[in-house]
Amino acid sequence: MLNLNRQYITGDFKQSIRLALWFTGLIWLIWSLGELLDLELYRFGVYPGSYEHITGVLTAPLIHGSLAHITSNTLPLLVMLALLFYAYPRSSLVVLIVLYLGSGLMVWVIGRHAWHYGASGMTHGLMFFLFVIGILRRDALAAAFAMIVFFLYGGMVWGIFPRDPEISFEYHLAGAILGILMAFLLRNYDRRLPEKRYDWEGEDDEDDIIGDDWKSPDP
């Protein structure tokens, strides 16, 4: 698990990367097996309104339909999962559970009658979470990570709108909504890095107070 010995300020950097690699490695393993064994993995996705396929909420983020699909999700997942685990060790598990399950449940309720699958709901949720929480917290680390994710993946904002009928914008939208919600709810859950203070900032203000002694006496 994460190294929380530093009072939850940050997670362990190397372990954060390992956890991100573990998850992305899992989706690549599942996709590879599906291709090698010619499995119809799309049937493990979410089919809105179908109680028979509601279990797809548990499996849909792990399923990808093509090499291009899984490739487009891999690097964003790696980068943003690592940032999440490192910057928000206390919040990370809650955020992942909500994005993983919550986005699928929302799609099951509001989605079009088609198969919805892929990790893009999580990538959108992570981008919106990291960006919004950075704005809300305003500490140096959170702000830096917010700028990084927006610079790299700010284009995901357009993914929440219906553009391509072959792409589940509903998953993107659900992830974005939940990411923003989690940012507001968990903005103070992780401790902030202590602000750097310089020696001169700790000086007693009384040393600078000269009062009214300089005034000339009344005539």
Image (cartoon, rainbow, N blue to C red):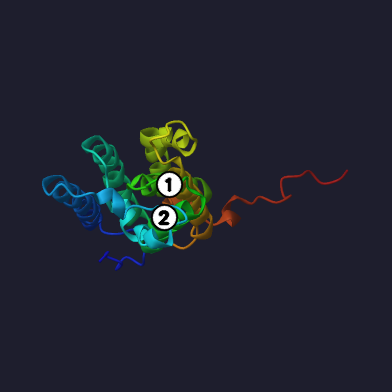
- Out of 217 and 161, give the one closest to the viewer: 161
Residue 182 in view? yes
Which residue is the site of mark 2?
104
x, y percentage for residue 55? 36, 62
Alpha carbon of mark 1 to alpha carbon of mark 2: how far?
Answer: 7 Å
Number of numbered markers: 2
Residue type at numbered disc 2: Gly
x, y percentage for residue 42? 29, 48
Asked if residue 160 lies left or right of residue 60, the reply is right
Q: Residues within 10 Å of mark 1 (few under 14, many from 20)?
A: many
Q: Secondary structure at mark 2?
A: helix
Asked if residue 42 lies left or right of residue 209, the reply is left
Residue type at numbered disc 1: Tyr
Tell whether label 2 touches label 1 (CB within 8 Å). Answer: yes
Q: Residues within 10 Å of mark 2 (few under 14, many from 20)?
A: many
Residue 15 location, quadrant: bottom left
- Out of 65 and 86, give the one closest to the viewer: 65
Which residue is the site of mark 1?
171
